[in-house]
Image: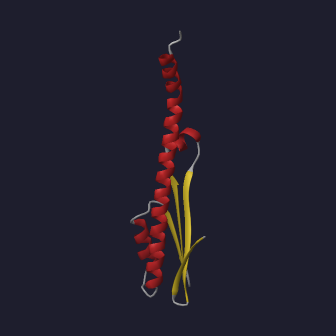
Amino acid sequence: MVNSKGQTLIIFVLILPILLLLLALIWEIGNLSLTTNKYETTIKNAIEYGLNNQEKENLEVILTNLIKANVKGDVQIEIKNYIKINVKQKYDTLYNNLFNHKFDIDITYIGYKENNQIIIKKE
């Protein structure tokens, strides 16, 4: 008779690294999506604040400080008759080192007022 406990153990040991890599990938994608969601919320709030306070001096500096309090990436703000905010960040993960794949965050939103309503769109 063949010892099935030994065979099961060998199969488990062979499959375990694959399972751990999949769990790590799920973890990294979850963290990336949470970070992206946080960045999008921060950008939308900053645009809304900027559109409600367009008369303030140094609005670009105020918005930059608001965003940088919650975001680690590079922030670019363009203020005209609209407010456009772009955030870029190199997002480091375990998979960047293993597979030379980069998960980068690049988010751009534009907001403007139309008929006294604030409209914020993702570009």
Query: Can residue 117 be seen at all in this image of the molecule?
Result: yes
Q: Quadrant of residue 45?
A: bottom left
Please state which of residues 5 and 54 is positioned toward the viewer in this rendering. Answer: 5
The quarter holding residue 100 reads top right
Say whether residue 68 is left or right of residue 80. Answer: left
Measuring 51% from the left and 35% from the top, which residue is drawn there?
19
State the image coordinates of residue 6 (x, y, percent, origin top left): 49, 17
Q: Does 90 appear above or below 42? A: above
- In the picture provided, is 7 more to the left or to the right than 65? right
- Residue 112's place in the image compared with 66, above or below, is below
7 relative to 88, above or below: above
Question: Residue at the spot x=55%, y=51% of the render?
Answer: 103
Residue 85 point in image, percent of width and height: 53, 71
Q: Check the image and name the residue furthest to the bottom.
A: 115
Colouring of the image = secondary structure
**Which residue is nearer to you in this view: 102 or 5?**
5
> Residue furthest toward the top?
1
Residue name at image x 44 percent, y 71 percent: 64
- From the top left corner, tell me how far across and down residue 27 is, in percent: 47, 46
**Farthest residue, direction left:** 69
Q: How far across and down, in percent of the image, does residue 81 sit?
A: 56, 85
Q: Quadrant of the C terminus?
A: bottom right
How many marks can you see? Answer: 0
